């Protein structure tokens, strides 16, 4: 479990750096896609609620440090999103095209709603808040659902190091 969390933390750190330094400097992108959210959703769907919460919190910490927002702003909604997607880890097969697109689409909608709700408690924080009916949300939504299968496929190369085997799985592998 610790190995999986360590590797997923390194991946989240790399995606935070890519998102904040590389993608933010590309001029033709209207809105930056949320690669960190996609990775967190993948880890949650792969390993369940506990790992989803941990990865959501870690990604929130990274983003809080990078964006300069008050500590806990990103942590709160990303932890909740990680938990919610972790509930479906046993029911969904994350390979293919449909599940990544739908799950990241729902995650992007949930992120926008949570940011609007949390912004009520942080009224003095100047954050770029968009509603569900705006061009910014539309472009982010489209970018996220287009990149979701690519990110999920890329992360599947690390699946051997990211998945946590339960004791029942180890017993079944021995037989």
Image (cartoon, rainbow, N blue to C red):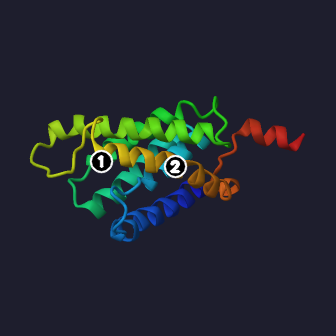
Which is nearer the eye, 99 or 166? 99
- Residue drawn at x 23%, y 37% is 116
Q: Secondary structure at mark 2?
A: helix
Image spot of residue 35 (x, y percent): 45, 55
Instruction: Looking at this view, name the residue that lies furthest to the left.
Output: 124
Q: Residues within 10 Å of mark 1 (few under 14, many from 20)?
A: some
To which residue does mark 1 refer? Answer: 136
Relative to 69, residue 120 above or below? above
Image spot of residue 67 (x, y percent): 26, 60
Residues under numbered marks 1 and 2 in contact, where contact means CB atoms less than 8 Å apart: no
Q: The C terminus lies in which quarter of the figure?
A: top right
Determine whether, in the image, residue 133 is placed left or right of residue 98: left
Q: Which mark is residue 146?
A: 2
- Residue drawn at x 38%, y 36% is 109
Which is nearer the eye, 54 or 90? 90
Tell me the CA gap for discs 1 and 2: 16 Å
Specify whether residue 132 is in view.
yes
Q: Residues within 10 Å of mark 2 (few under 14, many from 20)?
A: some
Which is nearer the eye, 40 or 61? 40
Q: Which mark is residue 41?
A: none
Q: Secondary structure at mark 1?
A: helix
Instruction: Looking at this view, name the residue that lies furthest to the right.
Output: 175
Image spot of residue 112 (x, y percent): 31, 39
Determine whether, in the image, residue 72 is placed left or right of residue 154: left
Specify whether residue 1 is in view.
no
- Residue drawn at x 11%, y 43% is 123
Which is nearer the eye, 128 or 158? 128
């Amino acid at each position: 479990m610790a190995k999986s969390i360590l590797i997923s933390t390194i991946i989240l750190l790399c995606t935070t750096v890519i998102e904040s330094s590389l993608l933010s400097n590309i001029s033709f992108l209207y809105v930056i896609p949320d690669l960190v959210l996609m990775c967190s959703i993948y880890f949650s769907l792969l390993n369940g609620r506990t790992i989803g919460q941990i990865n959501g919190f870690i990604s929130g910490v990274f983003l809080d440090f990078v964006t300069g927002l008050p500590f806990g702003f990103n942590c709160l909604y990303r932890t909740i999103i990680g938990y919610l997607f972790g509930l479906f880890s046993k029911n969904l097969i994350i390979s293919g095209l449909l599940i990544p697109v739908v799950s990241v689409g729902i995650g992007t909608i949930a992120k926008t709603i949570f940011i609007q709700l949390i912004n009520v408690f942080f009224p003095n924080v100047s954050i770029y808040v968009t509603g569900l009916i705006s061009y910014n949300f539309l472009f982010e939504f489209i970018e996220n659902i287009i990149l979701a299968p690519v990110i999920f496929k890329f992360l599947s190369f690390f699946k051997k190091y990211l998945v946590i085997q339960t004791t029942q799985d180890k017993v079944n592998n021995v037989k």
